[in-house]
Image: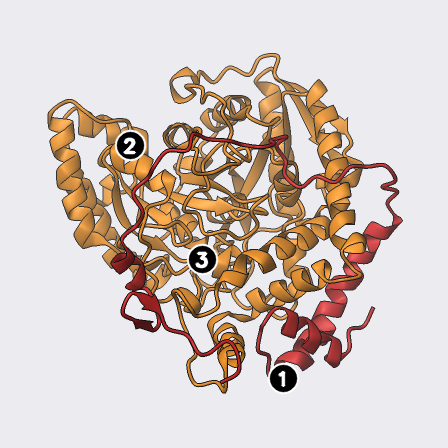
Amino acid sequence: MSEDLTRLTVSEAGALLRQRQVSSVELLQATLERIKATEEQVHAFITLTGHTALEQARRADEMLAKGQGTPLTGIPAAVKDVISTRGTRTTCGSKILEQFVPIYDANVITLLDEAGFVMVGKTNMDEFAMGSSGENSAYGPTRNPWALDRVPGGSSAGSAAAVASGMAYYALGSDTGGSIRQPAALSGVVGLKPTYGRVSRFGLVAFASSLDQVGPFTRSVRDAALVFEAIAGHDQRDSTSAEIDVPSIADTLDGNVRGLKVGVPREYFVEGMDPAVREAVEGAIRQIESLDAEIDTEVTLPSTGLGVAVYYIIAPSEASANLARYDGVKYGYSYQDGANMWENMERTRQHGFGEEVKRRIMVGTYALSAGYYDAYYLKAQQIRTLIRSEFDAAFGKYDVLITPVSPTPAFKIGEKVSDPLQMYLNDVCTIPVNIAGLPGISLPCGFATAPDGARLPIGVQILAKPFDEASIFRAAYAYEQSTDWHKQFPPL
Amino acid sequence: MALTPDQVRHIAHLARLGLTDEDVAKFAPQLSEILDYFERLKAVDTTGVPPTAYPLDLHNILRDDVEDPPAAAEEILKNAPQREGEFFRVRAILDE
């Protein structure tokens, strides 16, 4: 029974809770047993919080007994360790924050708390969300539940792996260049990056402030809509949070895409793409066409190929400024044995940061330094405008765009760590979405077969114009309901 | 473009980032390769194109000036690597 409980979706578990057929404490116990059985192999978590989760589950059961609560009340969840949780250490996958305990909750945590939140733990991630594999964590790599010798994708590695393996019903991640959608694709779950400004960034530890967004990982499209509705909305503590109403989506999903205008931009089918990925994504497009959507495969977004270069100037530039705060003075790791204050600061950052974080601070510092600002940062911001305009024009004609998420399925742990630029090129299909601030979802659309026979999940990406998450969910739900990819579980 | 070890050290100094000689030897070719990759942007004509700093067209966000209780100093200081009474303790910033 308890094994089966951990395979339920949020919607299914929520229905059982409201019918009083199961309690939040029982869901939590089943989840904690599942963690006990699988966490050693997967390593999805940096910090487990089973003890406080039990108190939260009891409180959720009291709410449910009074007929209160929301669709998420009492459902055990996991949170990426870049989201501040008051009283629970928040490391960002970095040694520099190993002992850091936030003094306030992120706005998304406050919102979930009001609805009876049950948090089982803080999930593993690439340090400060910089990475596409989870291997840049100071706490060791997370393993893909479908193939333990492979990466789950990143940077929200642990959140994707926890949801894929039944160690949480849903999880929160953050997405700056694909860090929700890419691990969702590689781990076989649903991942949504909301429109920039849709979800408050208050309490999300900053990586690149003009790109960062918080979003959910779930095992179904409807579940993603439920979590999205719960965490979205204006918050005056984030001055880039939009004052736009959040529509009710989950209750309106009906599987009908008749007449939906779908564009397929050809630049996303890049050279060197894995044939199995191409086949699966093209299969998904044909499937949506068979549901009477109108498909146009001749869409062109010519600046797509510039996205990676634009991103790897803008994101490291913003990161080099945001990460200046880690100086060993007010919190975090602090080197004390230097000859003076400056040496202490330099050694603090030398020993506290991992290699990829240092590399990006260096790239960003260089791009912003005297004499190079116009050639790199300003130029990248101008091309950012061009990329946005191309999307604007496309969304004048199409309701949604469909693309691959990642050019390849999950790769082996260690396979790409020595070549940073090759690792960056993994993000070619997800990065333009952050550059333009669009919403995007990744959902399962098939499997590739590894040489050793392992089944490796493949994801398809659906995009819409800013603040039109509803169209994304409409298309994603219709596709999902006509397939059974989302009902498959890793062999763990 | 190839970054020299001295250029790498200079950037690290600007970022207050300590690097070992091995780090410098490793980063110089890697950063050079990344900067070379950026060269493709030079071919794009951006004459008259305004820069995008944020994807939303938001300007001058204001809120009411309401009093909000500050976090307790004691709670903040719990994360301090070194403290003295109610203060963060640091090494002398001017000459010692």
Q: Which chain is orange?
A: A
Query: Which residue does the numbered mark 2 point to in the structure image?
Result: A72
Mark 2 neighbour density, 10 Å: few (under 14) some (14–19) many (20 or more): many
- Rounded to the nearest whole Å, what is the CA distance between mark 3 and mark 1? 26 Å
How crowded pointer 1 is (Cα within 10 Å; few <14, some 14-19, many 20+) is rated as: few
**Which residue type carries mark 3?**
Met
The numbered mark 3 sits on a residue in which chain? Answer: A
Indicate the secondary structure of the residue bearing disc 1. Answer: helix
What residue is pinned by disc 3? A125
User: What residue is at 62 percent from the left and 67 percent from the top?
Assistant: A359
Return the x and y of residue A122 as percentages of the image width and height. 34, 54
Q: Which residue is mark 1?
A: B22
Q: Picture coordinates of residue A289 (x, y %)?
A: 62, 21
Mark 2 falls within which chain?
A
Left/right placement of residue B25 relative to residue A150 reads right
Give the quadrant of residue A396. Answer: top right
In three-dimensional space, the C-alpha distance between marks 1 and 2, rounded to whole angstroms, equals 50 Å
Q: Residue type at mark 2?
A: Leu
